[in-house]
Structure formats: structure tokens, C-alpha cells
Image: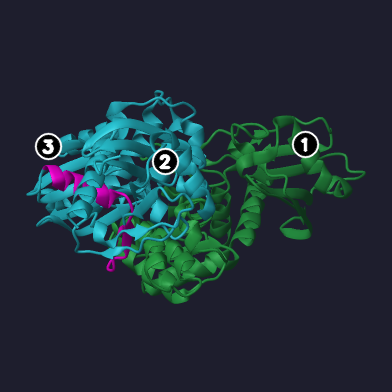
Chain colours: A cyan, B green
Amino acid sequence: MSGAFWIAVDWGTSHLRVWRMHRHEATNEAHSDQGMGRLAPEAFEPALLDLIGPWIQGAERVQVLACGMVGARQGWIEAPYVATPAAPGDPSAAVAAPVRDPRLDMRILPGLSQQAPPDVMRGEETQIAGLLLEDPGFSGLVCLPGTHSKWVRVAQGGVAGFQTFMTGELFALLSGQSVLRHSMPDELWNDDAFAAGFAAARDDAAAMARSLFAIRAAGLLRDVPPGVARARLSGLLVGAEFAAMGRDALTGAVAVIGGGAIADLYRKAFDLTGISARIIDAETATLRGLCAARDALERG
Amino acid sequence: MSGAFWIAVDWGTSHLRVWRMHRHEATNEAHSDQGMGRLAPEAFEPALLDLIGPWIQGAERVQVLACGMVGARQGWIEAPYVATPAAPGDPSAAVAAPVRDPRLDMRILPGLSQQAPPDVMRGEETQIAGLLLEDPGFSGLVCLPGTHSKWVRVAQGGVAGFQTFMTGELFALLSGQSVLRHSMPDELWNDDAFAAGFAAARDDAAAMARSLFAIRAAGLLRDVPPGVARARLSGLLVGAEFAAMGRDALTGAVAVIGGGAIADLYRKAFDLTGISARIIDAETATLRGLCAARDALERG
């Protein structure tokens, strides 16, 4: 096996995704649900080998580069955070993970931390590095929507600071387990209700807290078309992010790193705010970031 | 049995509480966990008789007056909301519940509704009626903290309008089921952290959404004393209520109807805001409100 062969790994709380790489090109891909959240430390190596075993048969030693929650304290091995401001995805701070299989040269990239206000990320920094590999001069705000949405200020090739919102987790809890679940028994959606909820919460930071229960009350007092309650809840929560970031934060370039429906949702939110956000596919960004780290490791 | 004997019932989502009454005096009390949330319509009468059976032996007919979620659409029988502005706890709108036991003259008091913004209450209106029985001239804001906190504008002997917050439910979901649960493994508390979180969210309506994840991040980045995370979360959520109500709402008389630790918490929040709130015990207020409704029924 030549030095051009390596393995890229995106290992989050609930997913494991691996790519067989030839330099910057993915030649194969595999994934499983063996996320960090369900694995004890000794279970990481077998979960990885389940996916990449066929790719490394006969290899002497293969470099494996991983990002994400696999480097958390409860992960395979802790990869301590690098404090911001910092260049994202710096592999010099990567941690070698203990392995039994001598073929594995396993490295885990660190996350980023911010002291004030306290904040952390693991995985998103690699996506930012991917953006910067493609566009080294990018300067502006990067929005990474998800369970815990991140808004990242990028300047001079590094992360200047960032802000996390629990938007996705709040949506899941409120739509699935709170009294609001009775108002959204199906998965339907209503674009206008999203837009109205978003604008209300974006333009008045108090509106989110004030308007949650009204979703339930509206359904008790009048006929509400299907999909309205769910979309309005989403709009209120996303709008609260925009309100908290403030208009000033949105004056420069804005990129959204995300995939599928959630990227569309945030694109719409930026559109409604008169901002043309560039959309970057999350998986593409992750893979590019891992490639950037691999390049840096190769350079030594 | 004389007409002075009746039964007062506070029937919420998760509790059932009954009092054996002689006019305005409670001569016995009983309760169970047979709340509306776990009962099919035909199970309400047996759940009630389990508690009051011994009190009505030999009676021909007994008036039973109930408030709370027992009158919801999923309750014993729906007691349609009375639209605000309205006098709270008006028994002329009470609904007779269907019974098998001929001794029961069962009436359920209606809740209150508000069209814009949409909002509803069931049970709190009876507590407001209790406040007004004791202090008919009360005019100001009544805060009823709980799973769904209510802020009620009372004027001219009636409810002018109200606003519900999902504060208690958000606290339970975030502290028990979100990623923040890892930061609060115990039930400890820290008064200073409550005060700081409360002030931050009260003075900046965007602070609550912005500061939730920081509770988790702080615990990952530094040693946080026990109780700080839980109290800070509570402070942020209660502070968001105050931010949404606004200073203007708090210029007049303020009463808090609540019991135990939650009443203490809101008393502290008002103290921190320089407002001396009168505290009224929730159970006392409910019972007084049921007495007021009983008086009105007796008058015809």
C-alpha cells in the first residue's frame, strides 16, 4: 500500500461514517449507527474494523484520521480542545488512539473551545477547515445547523469565536415530548407558518419564550391546518438564533454548512432576512477538512 | 345532611385533591395520583369515589364542585372555556358531569381562554377567584408559576388577559433529558447561580437561548461547583419570563400564587427585581376559589 491510501472517519454521537481515501479522493464509503454515544472505550476499535476491515486486508500500516465526538472524554480517547482563536482542524494537536490491531495508525483531531462565554465544538471545526481548504480567504460567519447549531466567526484563516444554540435538541424535545406534541401528531409542514414564526422570533428576542404555549392553545381554540404547529415551532426556535446573533453579525459573508432538509430550512431563514447564504454540503465539508488535516500531517 | 355540606375538588393533570367542606371550612382532606392525564372518561367517577366514598355514606345528594384539567376535552366531560375578559370561576358556566351514583351532583368549572394571542387556563382561574374573594379590589399582575407558568392581568374583579410560559416543562425536559442533564447529576442548588442566570435572561431577552449550551460547556472546560448548573438553568428560564413580560407589566401590585420551593423561587426573582410580591399559597387560593363558586351557586 502506498502512502496515498488512508482512511477518513467522521464519528459523531449517533453515527460512524468512513471513507477509503486515495489522496483527496474517496474511493469507497461505509457507515453504521455505532456512534460514540453507545460505545464503551474498548468498543471503538471493533466498530471501526467492522467497516474498514475489508479495505485494509494485507496492509502493513494505514493512517486513520477521525473527527467528532470520538475524541470526547467519553469517547475512544480524549483529544483535548484547542482554545480559540485557532486554526481549525490542526492535526498537530491530534491524539493517537490506543489500538490492538498493529495496522491502525489511529489519530483523533481535537475540537475547539472558547472560554468566554464557555463553548465547545467537536467535528464542526473540521468542516470549517474544509471550507477554508476550498476558500482560504473566507471571512465571515458560518452557520452549522443541527442538534446543537453552531455560529462560527471565521477570520484570517481561523476561528475567532463561536456560539452554540440547542435548537435541534429543543425542537426534538418540544415536538416529541412536551404538551406541544398533541398539536403536531404528524410530520406535516407549512412553509408560511415557519416564515411567520421565524420572523416573529427573529425580530423580538422575547417572542420565542412567549409564543411556545400559544402553539398548543391555538389548536385548542380554533382549527389549525396540518403542519402549521410543527413549522411554527421550528420557526420560533430558528428565529431565536437569529435574534441572539443580532443583525450586526450578519453584515458580511455568510455560509451554511449542512445537508438536506435542515440546510434548506436555514437557507430559507437567511432568504427571509435578505441575506444570500452560500450552502456547503456538510459531508463534503467534513471530508475536505479531513483531507486538509491529512495534508498537514504529510507535510509534517 | 344539610346544605352546608359539599365537596371541593382540585383535579389536575397529575393529581386529584378533595376536601370535605362545611360551608367555607375544610373538615377533611384526601388526595391521590389519579390525575386527569391517566384517566379515561369512565374512570373519573370511580377515582373520585375512592376518595370521597367514606364522606358521603348515607347522604342523599351532595354537591361536588371541581376545577382543573378534569374539564378538558380529554377529561371527565368538557367544560368549554369562558373567553376573557371575564370574571374568573363563574359557576353559571359550570358543566354537570354524567354520573352513575345518584348521590353525586357533580359540576366542573370552566377554564378561561384568550383569542389573541391564543392562550388557555384550567384551574388557575379558580385560584384568581380565590384571591378576589379575599381581596375583591385587587388590581395588578398575578404570577402562577408551575409546569406552565401563567401571568394574569387582574382588573375590576376580572381577568383582563394572560400569558403562559412553558417554564416548568422546559426545565424538566432540559434538566432531565437534554445534553444538559450530564451537567446536573444531582438535585443540588446554588442561589447565586440562580440569581446570575435570572438577571442575565431578565435583562436581555436573547440571553436564554444564547446561554443554555454554555451550561454544558462550562462544565467541560472548568470545575463548576455542584448545584450551579441546575440553578443557572432555572434562573435563565425564569428570567426569560420576566424579559417577555417587560418592566411595564411590573409597575403595579404583584401577587404570586404558588406553594413550596417554586413560590420561594419566584419570590426571590421578584426581590431581585426590586418588586415586593405578595405570596398566596396555591392550595389556599384554590379552595377559596371553589368556595366563591359554591357561594355563587347557592345564591343561584
Q: Is residue A215 above or below residue A40?
A: above
Is residue B81 depicted above or below B159 in this figure? above
Q: Residue under mark 3: which chain is it in?
A: A
Distance, label 3 to label 1, CA atoms, is 60 Å
Q: Is residue A163 above or below residue A4?
A: below
Residue B275 in view, yes or no? no
Q: Which residue is mark 3?
A: A276
Look at the image and give the residue range highlighted in magenta: A110-134
Disc 2 chain ID: A
Say whether mark 1 and mark 2 are on the same chain.
no
* Residue in the image at 65% along x and 51% along y: B290
Residue mark closest to the camera, 3 vs 2: 2
Residue, disc 1: B45
Residue B140, image x, y percentages = 41, 60
Q: Is residue A131 magenta?
A: yes
Camera-near label (2 vs 1) is 2
| Residue at x 53% of width, y 57% of height | B132
Q: Amino acid at mark 2?
A: Leu
Residue that label 2 marks = A16
Q: Left of B129 or right of it: where is B211?
A: left
Find numbered disc 2 in the image and state the secondary structure of the residue it sits on: strand
Query: Is there a contact, CB below 8 Å, between mark 2 and mark 1?
Result: no
Q: Secondary structure at mark 1?
A: helix
